[in-house]
Amino acid sequence: MSIFFGSLIHGIGDFSIVFGFLRGEVSDFWMTFSIPVAYFHYKKIENRSVIHKAIGLSFAIIVFTGIVSIFTPYRLGKWISMGFAYPEGERLQHFAGVIGGHFTYLPIGLMNTHLTYGGILGMGYLGFVFYCLHRFFDFSPIRKIIIFLALFISTFVVFYNQSRSIWIGCIFTLSIYIASIFVFKIYTFFHHRFYESHKLHILSEGNQNLPKAIEPPTQINFWKKRWAQILIGIVFLASIVVMMNLAWSKNWLIQRALQDSLTQKTTENQRYFIWKNSIQVLKSNWILGVGNANFRKIHTIESNQMIKEHEELWYELFITPRGHAHHDFMHFFIVGGILTAIIWIFFWSLLWTYFYASIKTYTQSFSWGVLVLFAAGFFQCYQLDDEVVLPFYALVGIFIGGRQIFRPWHFIAGFITTILFLVMSIGYWTYRSSEDPAQIHLRKITYQNQENIQLNKNPGSIYLEGCLSHYFGDPPKNRDIAMSIGIFIEKNQIHSPKKATITLYDRDSFDQDQLYKAHSKTPIVTKYFSLEQGENWFDFPESVVKEKSEEFPGQVRFRDFEIIFDDGDLNQKLELPILYLSPLCEKVKSM
């Protein structure tokens, strides 16, 4: 509602704002009505058995369709809706790797993207994990085996889905759960010690009647078989590690996902650019926000300003999604202003309050999966995805529909949890966005023989990402300066190359992820150069194009370079020189 109010303020005198409510953030407001519907249905005890079975069946369907989608190149939802046919030109699945001789793809179930599927799968998976912790020892031996296999398979699907934000959300929530267990254990221990000492004091004074205020805490079946559960968890995690090691060795997408998670600077820095420009937007609009459905427009203006200052980032900013902030809190803050930010904090504080109030009794623990979107939402905007938020709000209604006994410290703990990790998230994206954009950009370099680099031998050809054929503008402007590449050989290099063969390539500049196809490249010209110690600059007038482009990408193309040193003897000892391309691939006075 705060976004609705802010949009009215921004729309004063603009009647088109009425149509804006049919799109953007406010358009999904009606989905929040699923909270009271689910709440009142779950309040009736006679409905709970049916609801539990419906949730379990839904999760089974989600996992099953995810497994099927791993082994099919088609997007199942669209394939089924089109009568089990897939028209030519439709976007296919993301190839993941080869396992057991079979092509595999990122699991997306019946959804359109792996992130949407990951959000839905994450909520169901985490709820299933908590349900297993609650009921595992109540099952028969046969059912325990079935549950364990189901948990094993669903864990594999979650891992193979490669939604790193969901991984973080699951790890974070389970860590909070484990930490809470130990805190409650310590509290119960000291509470019991206090009770015993206070009881002896009263008895020594001759008072045999123990006041109600210091009656011993009610003992519930909370710690029973706790160590057995931990042992099962360790065995389960060990088996998962073995299975994932096999997947890692065969799946290049998983390798890239984990490597990018651990690397500060990569050739894909879209989240950095999104956060960097979002912070600039927030600084100017933190009171009332930018209004409903205005994020993309305002963010694009900020991105274009960055391109003017660092034109070499034009392509990276072009392919960077601008529809949302990739951070739930930041996005709602930007759109709705300070009031929306406060409501968001209160909303999650309330959910964590219910979690702490029900953690001992495992009340409706299968719905605890909604908490996965708290930490996951620090890296994506799951609360803007209508396919995710509809089941999310329904599970929230069930989550708060159970019976809990609240204590003041429950809300305090919930508020502290929300604020603490929100502040950590703010600190993280503030730190990441503080870096100079020029230092973030890295050119992609491909070696024909990567292993020779480690052996100090000739790598064969070196393919170096170049620059765009036009200057930034609306429309793009034709370049009037030829591209140049510099090769620097130090004086103390003994085994330096004496000549180089350089080929200039023409390459596409469309968004590969959006069109789901790779850039094609064709050679333009090949030149042969002799190398000397010091700076060597080589100009390529062929890089200049005469064709005008009305838009980007349009006629805008990449100009890349392939360099081969000496005679291509891959076994000779070679000290590679320094390759230099200026930000716009133009000759500079000094390297």
Image (spheres, rainbow, N blue to C red):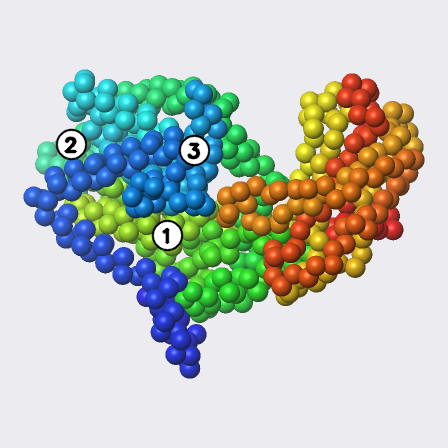
Dot 2 or dot 1, earlier in sequence: 2
- Asked if the residue at tag 3 contacts the one at tag 1, i.e. Cβ–Cβ closer than 8 Å, the answer is no
**Residue 292 position by quadrant:** bottom left
Q: Quadrant of the C terminus?
A: top right
Pointer 1 local density, CA inside 10 Å: few below 14, some 14–19, many at least 20? some
- Front-most of residues 120 and 411: 120
Query: With respect to residue 429, does 25 lie above or below?
Result: below
Query: With respect to residue 358, does 437 lie above or below?
Result: below
**Residue 180 position by quadrant:** top left
Q: Nearer the viewer, mark 1 or mark 3?
A: 3
Which residue is denoted by mark 3 in the rendering? 105
Q: Position of residue 579 (x, y in %)?
A: 79, 38
Question: Which residue is found at the position 51% from the left and 56% from the top?
Answer: 322
Pointer 2 local density, CA inside 10 Å: few below 14, some 14–19, many at least 20? few
Numbered label attached to residue 203: 2
Residue found at the very far left of the displayed protein: 46
Q: Amino acid at mark 3?
A: Tyr
Q: Tell me the CA gap for discs 2 and 3.
A: 71 Å
**Residue 85 position by quadrant:** top left
Dot 2 or dot 3, earlier in sequence: 3
| Left or right side of 477 for 401 | left
| Left or right side of 463 for 170 | left
Numbered label attached to residue 385: 1
Q: Amino acid at mark 2?
A: Leu
Q: Position of residue 271 (x, y in %)?
A: 54, 48
Label 2, secondary structure: give it: helix
Q: Amino acid at mark 1?
A: Asp
Q: Tell me the CA gap for discs 2 and 1.
A: 62 Å
Q: Position of residue 40 (x, y in %)?
A: 14, 53
Question: Which residue is found at the position 27% from the left and 57% from the top?
Answer: 31
